[in-house]
Image (tube, rainbow, N blue to C red):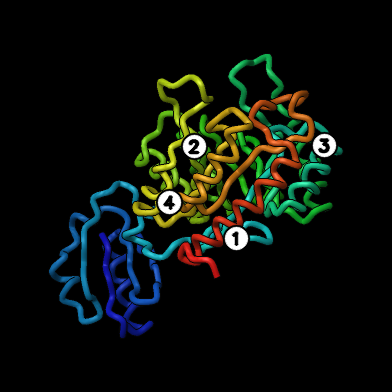
Amino acid sequence: MIVVLKKNASPERLKSLVSWLETKGVSVHSSVGEAHTILGLVGDTSALDIDLISALDIVEDVKRVQEPYKNANRKFHPEDTVVPVGNTRVGGGSLTLIAGPCSVESEEQVVGIARAVKAAGATMLRGGAFKPRTSPYSFQGLGARGLDFLKSARAETGLPIVTEIMDIGQLSLFADVDLIQVGARNMQNFDLLKALGRQEKPVLLKRGLSATYEEWLMSAEYVMAGGNENVILCERGIRTFETYTRNTQDLAAVPVLKKLSHLPVIIDPSHASGRSWLVPPMATAAVAAGADGLIVEVHNDPEHALCDGAQSLRPEEFAALAPRLCALHGFLAAGGETK
């Protein structure tokens, strides 16, 4: 249920109303916008009397919400959410460029790539320390040592680090990670999502291979229901009948999710395509679709990469792509008109 308050609602009346609603057994989430204050009521609202609430002098409107996701719903939170990550922010009209290797292979490798992508305009560094692989015989990552190498790269460049968590047991190792990534395979690992909701680090939630928009948003709801509202949605391609590309990049996810939710949406063109030459055009299309950012795989020696070299850009290729993406984003932000 949503309760829209009048513009002149006093803080005292607002506090009194929230306290009264909470006595009815529901949780109340406040969203203060430029025009209205909106109260999102989460829980069993079936016993609440809409007419009684509507009659209160500070209430402008009351609506029931049909969607099962509440915290992630734009109806509850009309203003776009901006997620702080280290020394940068995701959303709010900016374009976030996250770049780095699929897997951390050595300290020298990840620090060198971090320097290169920062010089090209990246605002965050990605790199896998723990790697979920289809084959048990493939490289599984360096683990905790890989996390230490990422921290060295952050100390060297100042870039916040993004890396994937595999299970709850690793959570203590991620205390000094700036943005915790939940991969496609774990999108519906609900125990992990609950645990991430009880901690304060922002979460990058990738879409499952065959997940619907609603299923994806419900996974975000698990994190947010635990108290952590700093969630970023990442479209990384879905499984379709097409086999030429690794996955099928669903660019419609950007406008759809921005209509349904207030959370930032970024695109992963590397995993979506599986081919490095497809990354620049698909990244460009993602910016044109309104994405809040991109997460791109960059490797200094793709031919000898231990993981996903075929979809990785070289540092010089990322350096050529990044300014074009920023220019397009600036052009669109200005209303599509040159200054």
Residue 215: name its quadrant: top left
Q: Position of residue 78 (x, y in %)?
A: 37, 64
Residue type beneath disc 1: Arg
Name the amino acid type tagged 3.
Gln
Q: Secondary structure at mark 4?
A: helix
Label disc, if present, on residue 109 of the rendered structure: 3
Label 1 Cα crowd, 10 Å radius (few <14 / some 14-19 / many 20+): some
The part of the image, by quadrant, that contains residue 102 is top right
The location of residue 6, given as percent across then percent down, is 27, 79
Name the residue nearer the viewer: 250 or 51. Answer: 250
The answer to whether 286 appears left or right of 132 in the picture is left
Residue located farthest toward the left when viewing the structure as drawn: 51
Q: Earlier in the sequence, mark 4 or mark 1?
A: 1
Q: Nearer the viewer, mark 4 or mark 3?
A: 3
Q: Amino acid at mark 4?
A: Ala
Residue 217 vs 308, above or below: the answer is: below
- Pick the residue in front: 242 or 86: 242
Q: Nearer the viewer, mark 2 or mark 3?
A: 3
**Secondary structure of residue under mark 1:** strand
What residue is drawn where x is 78% and y is 30%?
301
Q: Which residue is mark 2?
A: 191
Q: Is residue 56 left or right of residue 167?
A: left
What residue does disc 4 label? 225
Q: Work out whether mark 3 precedes mark 1 in sequence or the reverse, and give the earlier one.
A: 1
Q: Quadrant of the C terminus?
A: bottom right
Give above or below for 154 relative to 2. Answer: above
Distance, label 1 to label 2, CA atoms, is 27 Å
- Pick whichever of labels 2 and 3 is earlier in the sequence: 3
Q: CA distance from mark 3 to mark 1?
A: 26 Å
Could you say which disc has been placed on residue 89 in the image?
A: 1
* C-alpha distance separating marks 2 and 3: 34 Å
